[in-house]
Image: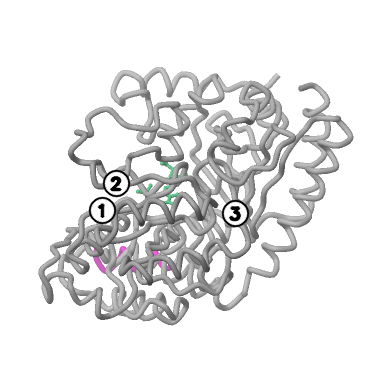
Amino acid sequence: MISRARSEQLFAEALKYIPGGVNSPVRAFRAVGGQPFFVNRAKGAHVWDVDGNELIDYVGTWGPAILGHAHPKIIKAVQQAAEQGTSFGIPNPHEVTMAKLICELVPNVEKVRMTNSGTEACMSAIRLARGFTKRDKIIKFDGCYHGHADSLLVKAGSGALTFGHPDSAGVPASFTQHTIVVPYNDPEALRAAFAANSGQVAGVIIEPVAGNAGLYVPKPGYLEFLREITAANGALLIFDEVMTGFRLAAGGAQQRFGIKPDLSCFGKIIGGGLPVGAFGGRADIMDYLAPLGPVYQAGTLSGNPVAMAAGIAALEELKATNAFDLLEKLGAQLESGLRDAAKSASVPVTFNRCGSMFCGYFTDQPVHNLADAMKSDRERFKKYFHGMLDAGVYLAPSQFEAGFISAAHSTEDIDRTVAAAAKVMKSL
Ligand code: KE4
């Protein structure tokens, strides 16, 4: 019997001082029941909870740990940078190195501004799009999550969706009146939205691969359609690559799918596990930002030297090892194993994957958008999640989250995961 006594103690303590006992809602296990476990050590593809239970980790701190946890080169970079001082509030050389790296790896990004989270990156990109086009309306897609800025918390994904109330309390209707939401993978709906708001749309923001309602991918031609219709309507195309950036290819989803967005948002991987976000794109747009232009955006810790050093180490390691072939291979191994496990257990599972991002939905229908994802059997997912956890495999604690494979996952890890799934699925 697995003991999580110390986690239970910590959670009871946490509940006294932190709302819901967590600093980010999805960690609270509300979507799967039970209590969260606490971790004090992670290495490679594994985490150890405070009761000493070892787990194969497919959350990877929600994406940043693409090289695995506590990668030696990242740890060394953080130690060396920290010894020089943890923050200056004055330009530092790491900021230049990071900016050059991002522009080199993502050619569509001519200039980039660092932030401290993906939320800040997306919020700032939206403000910049509005300032540049002098238009107010923004189109987003249901199930896509772009952080918790007020105007974007409309039919959002991730934790907001997990709680089943996609719109958040505390957001005045006036803050979202300019936000239009359309279904993903539905060209007609987008065409109609532009027709109904002709000349008013500042930008369209999309997760090029949607990873906040589980995982669904753009249908063939859909992203090309987005590029055409935004250009034709004078609206900016904004790729939210906070999750997909530097994961689906060195140049992110825009490289994988060959699309040239006007602006892109980043986070997660570029911080090497430390708090970082960024947004970038066409220089003529980015130069609208203060101090050059009229669009204000700022941050005390933006470009923090320690966070930059961690992110630079991560990006340089990704460049040097070209981990993407390995991630593709591991992803394919996991996909075929889990498909076989579901088949042998006669459990209907739709398994979506793009590179090292994946999601298994408990439904026999295809999943191309939020409405499809909502048809999944969440009770079944809950049982599956806990069965896998007890078997030593940590999956995202919600049906509406993506899983992440790292370059540190071994084929043995994948085999163990598949064997556990074969057993657990038989009990569902
Ligand atoms: P952060 O503010 O959490 O750094 O980034 C917000 C964000 C923006 N865009 C995309 C595509 C994202 O996936 C995210 C954050 N992802 C969630 C996981 N689904 C973070 C986990 C959490 O909220 O605790």
Which secondary structure, mark 2?
strand
Residue 422 picture quarter: top right
Q: Nearer the viewer, residue 74 or 400?
A: 400
CA neighbours of label 1 inside 10 A, class few (<14), some (14 to 19), many (20+):
many
Image location of residue 247, percent across then percent down: 55, 63
Give, as a three-letter code, the residue at label 3: Val
Name the residue located 34 percent from the left edge and 58 percent from the top edge.
276
Image location of residue 129, percent across then percent down: 25, 64
The part of the chain drawn in magenta is: 77-85
**Image side of residue 283 versus residue 350, left or right:** left
Give, as a three-letter code, the residue at label 2: Thr
**Image side of residue 277 versus residue 344, left or right:** left
Label 3 or label 1, whichever comes before in sequence order: 1
Name the residue located 28 percent from the left edge and 23 percent from the top edge.
17
**Image side of residue 52 versus residue 298, left or right:** right
Image location of residue 161, percent across then percent down: 45, 33
* Quarter containing the N terminus: top right
- The residue that mark 1 highlights is 137
Image location of residue 167, percent across then percent down: 34, 32
**Image side of residue 255 versus residue 365, left or right:** left
Q: CA distance from mark 2 to mark 3?
A: 23 Å
Query: For the residues carrying marks 3 and 1, which lies nearer the camera in this image?
Result: 1
Label 2 or label 3, whichever comes before in sequence order: 2
Q: Is residue 31 above or below residue 97?
A: above
Give, as a three-letter code, the residue at label 1: Lys
Task: Determine if the magenta segment contains residue 37.
Answer: no
Are circles 2 and 1 on residues that touch, CB within 8 Å? Answer: yes
- The residue that mark 2 highlights is 179
Q: Which mark is residue 217?
A: 3
Residue 319 picture quarter: bottom right
